[in-house]
Image: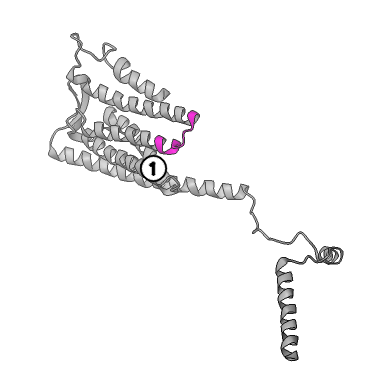
Amino acid sequence: MVGASASIAMELFIGPQRHQPFDTDGTIPSYHLHNFEHSNISMTFFVFAAFCVVLDRVRPKAYFELTQFVGTVAFGQELLLFHLHSADHMGPEGQYHLLLQLLVLVSFATTLLGIALPNSFLVAFVRSLSIVFQGLWLILMGFALWTPSFIPKGCFMHLEDGHKVVRCAGDEPLHRAKSLINIQFSWLLIALTILGLSFYLVLLKLYQQQTPKINPVQYFSLITNDDEEAAATSTPTKTTSYDVVSKSFIQMGHKLTDTDMER
């Protein structure tokens, strides 16, 4: 919630030159549209975090499902706004945004699957990795697009609509820049997969070492043989109604047999 609040303040009040996003006539200028789009994403995650706290305290019956639902709304909002971004999606920045949408789509899909599969470890694991990947990719975007020494060869920083964007001199530098971005994405994907699985295996190893091994449960009688013999000698045998009925039938059978023999 603190991070989302800081992001909203940066987009709407700290970043703009006049420390407010509106024009002199109270309208939203075109060069501040992306600020509102980014702040809406942060606002959605603020709502998600706030409802997580509320639901955790109230603990309704559908606590987990509602939490996953609000998370799905947050990732869906993020995917929608990045897909319908006011920027032209041209140049290297557009390629970064395109690959970012793939990561957001994975987070959205796994959060939606979490409602139907709440006990699936794989769904939660992939969702966690995709969220970490989003953060790392945004950090990489910040360094690669707004650090002059990291801009691909043949591309330059250009001021458009009140904010700086990276443009390339021709098709060849543009294709080269997009290929470099794809390579960065592939490297980061491989590195994150290795780190994620390694971290899981290390934690699994540590947890198994700290948890004592539980032997299989063995069932045994609480009464020993001596106790059984003592109980048999001291306690008279109870005669059930079934035994009485059975004996009566036997006695009746004997009487019938004697009568038949006399006849």
Does residue 7 sit above or below 177 in this rendering? Answer: above
Q: 37 or 218, which is in the foreground?
A: 218
Image quarter in which the C terminus is found: bottom right
Residue type, mark 1 in image: Ile
Q: What stretch is highlighted in magenta?
A: 58-66
Q: In the image, what residue occupies the spot 64% across and 54% down?
A: 214
Q: Position of residue 21 (x, y in %)?
A: 25, 15
Whether residue 29 is visible, yes or no, is yes
Image quarter in which the N terminus is found: top left
Whether residue 154 is visible, yes or no, is no
- Please give the residue where the numbered disc 1 appears in the rendered image: 115
Q: Where is residue 63 in the image (x, y as percent from the top left)?
A: 45, 35
Q: 105 or 92, which is in the foreground?
A: 105
Does residue 28 sit above or below 225 in this rendering? Answer: above
In the image as oriented, which residue stretches furthest toward the front? 263
Q: In the image, what residue occupies the spot 64% across and 51% down?
A: 212
Q: Where is residue 105 in the image (x, y as percent from the top left)?
A: 29, 41
Q: In the picture, residue 258 is in which quadrant?
A: bottom right
Does residue 186 sit above or below 42 in this rendering? Answer: below
Q: Is residue 75 left or right of residue 237?
A: left
Q: In the picture, residue 67 is in which quadrant?
A: top left
Q: 55 or 187, which is in the foreground?
A: 55
